[in-house]
Image: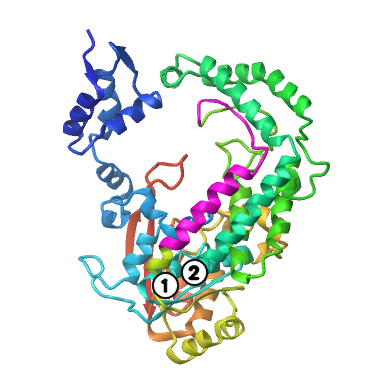
Amino acid sequence: MAELLSIKEASQWASEYLEKNVTTSNISYLIQYGRIKKIEDNGSTQVIKEELIDYYKDQKKSRQEKWKEQLGEDLNWALSFEQFKEAETTKHVHRLHPYKGKFIPQLVEYFLDNHTDKFKKEVYFKPSDIVYDPFSGSGTTMVQACELGIHAVGNDVSAFNALIGNCKVTKYKLVDVQTEINRISKALKLFLADHKTLEFEDRLLKELYVFNNKYFPVPEYKYKVKRKEIDEKTYGAEKEKEFLPTFNNLVKEYKIKLRQDKEDSFLDKWYTQHIRDEIQFVFDEIKKIKNHDTKKIISVILSRTIRSCRATTHADLATLLEPITATYYCGKHGKMCKPLFSILKWWGTYSKDTIKRLAEYDKLRKETFHTCLTGDSRNIDIVDGLKKLNPDFAKLVEKQKIKGIFSSPPYVGLIDYHEQHAYAYDLFGFERKDELEIGPLFKGQGREAKQSYIQGLSDVLNNAKQYLVEDYDIFLVANDKYNMYPTIAENAGMQIVNQYKRPVLNRTEKDKGAYAEIIFHLKNK
């Protein structure tokens, strides 16, 4: 007969077995997501010990041991920052807006702060130094430099990236930001009062709740799927078809317009008509804001909101396959889900979250200069660019010069940086500069793309050198699987003096495999 354990006993057993703390919440999670079976006995929940053993046996060997077997013994596990929870790696303003391909703030802190250890044997930057990030992206280097009292210049070819970075380091009148958010939220609710969208969504959610409880009971359904007792694909498609008439009847009853009349732009194609109308309404309200900084940060809140409201499945939010305008079986949640028909919920959530994060960062930041320029890092005139935006900072750069660089250049053939925020370019009317991206996805990873990448990075470093002190320190974070960085360093008249190979944990929800990147330390020859 199978041995049964209570959740508390299972927690104790797993903690001893793995020699690390496994909480009762961890065990409850396994039940909730169908990893192990839930047994009800006289009102108490129990689990089968044999199933726990099967689940945890692969974790007996630590992730560190397994990854070192796959990636090599030179893997520097201290730079995994495994000890930090997600809330810490996305702390304060770092989660103001989604962004693919950003590094965690702890990695920046490690090289910018004043500590030393057995790997980092000297301090490279001190307060009042200037650091430069020629691929500023979402502004992580600038944010952490400001927290450490280090001045920071960012640069990015994408106008939207520069907006995000600058919004993160701007000091706001939070009362004004909150006042404008309240005004727009009130106006949006009045706008929606004249529509039936929210009533439609409420009815739809109630129908889905009944349907999901009947056909996708938690946690039994997920448990059966895990053990292949149910063919998820076939069953999901069957139930999707079964629910569709209910959805269609509600759409007809409330006169919901699922598609827009044209699909000429991203905003036309990936949003239902109702959401598109709400987006435009809020955008028009934002235009009325007088304070320039307030207007920018609330624009970022709207951008974050509309990213979450695209007509796509939960599983494909980051990739986008085809617009979804009806209820669908969701593999991520193991039940029937629906596309969004109003931005109100996310607008409210992200507005509150943004105010909270800005207030947190306000307590940590130091009085420093920090500006992200928009331009091509291969030829941008940093001083001239700063003179237009921050003349005092321009004088400091001319007088003091930049101590070094901390940056994560794009990986060759991996991401189209403009396309990931296509909705924002459409809405805000920013000029796209896709052709100036270095190593974009659309150019691939062929021989010509690699040569172009090497030339591009070499040009960036050569252009930056004129603004650097003689004894500069440059740190570039890269997964150099094509061994291009020695050539890049040579082309820029630099030498690679050290390499730190770090494991990158939990890059995306879908990709948990062993993966490493190298931090190249470059100095003058």
Residue at mark 2: 169
In the figure, is residue 411 to the left or right of 506?
right
**Marks 1 and 2 close (CB-CB < 8 Å):** yes
- Whether residue 403 is situated above or below residue 230 in the rendered picture: below
Name the residue located 55 percent from the left edge and 36 percent from the top edge: 315
Which of 341/321 is in front? 341
- Whether residue 343 is situated above or below residue 16 in the rendered picture: below
- Is residue 402 found inside the magenta-colored segment of the image? no
**In the rendered picture of this protein, how many numbered marks are placed on residues?**
2
Q: Residues within 10 Å of mark 1 (few under 14, many from 20)?
A: many
Residue 348 placement (x, y as % from top left): 57, 48
Check the image and name the residue furthest to the right.
261
Give the amino acid type for the residue marked by disc 1 in the picture.
Answer: Cys
Question: Please, what secondary structure does the residue beneath circle 1 have?
Answer: helix
Check the image and name the residue furthest to the bottom.
399
Residue range in magenta is 333-360
In the figure, is residue 471 to the left or right of 269?
left
Residue 11 placement (x, y as % from top left): 23, 29
Q: Quadrant of the N terminus?
A: top left
- Is residue 350 found inside the magenta-colored segment of the image? yes
Residue 71 placement (x, y as % from top left): 33, 49
Question: Please, what secondary structure does the residue beneath circle 2 have?
Answer: helix
Give the amino acid type for the residue marked by disc 2 in the picture.
Answer: Val
The CA span between labels 1 and 2 is 8 Å
Residue 454 visible in the current orientation: no
Residue 275 in which image quadrant: top right
Earlier-in-chain disc, 1 versus 2: 1
Residue 321 in which image quadrant: top right
Name the residue located 59 percent from the left edge and 66 percent from the top edge: 294
Name the residue located 45 percent from the left edge and 58 percent from the top edge: 357
Residue at mark 1: 146
Residue 163 visible in the current orientation: yes
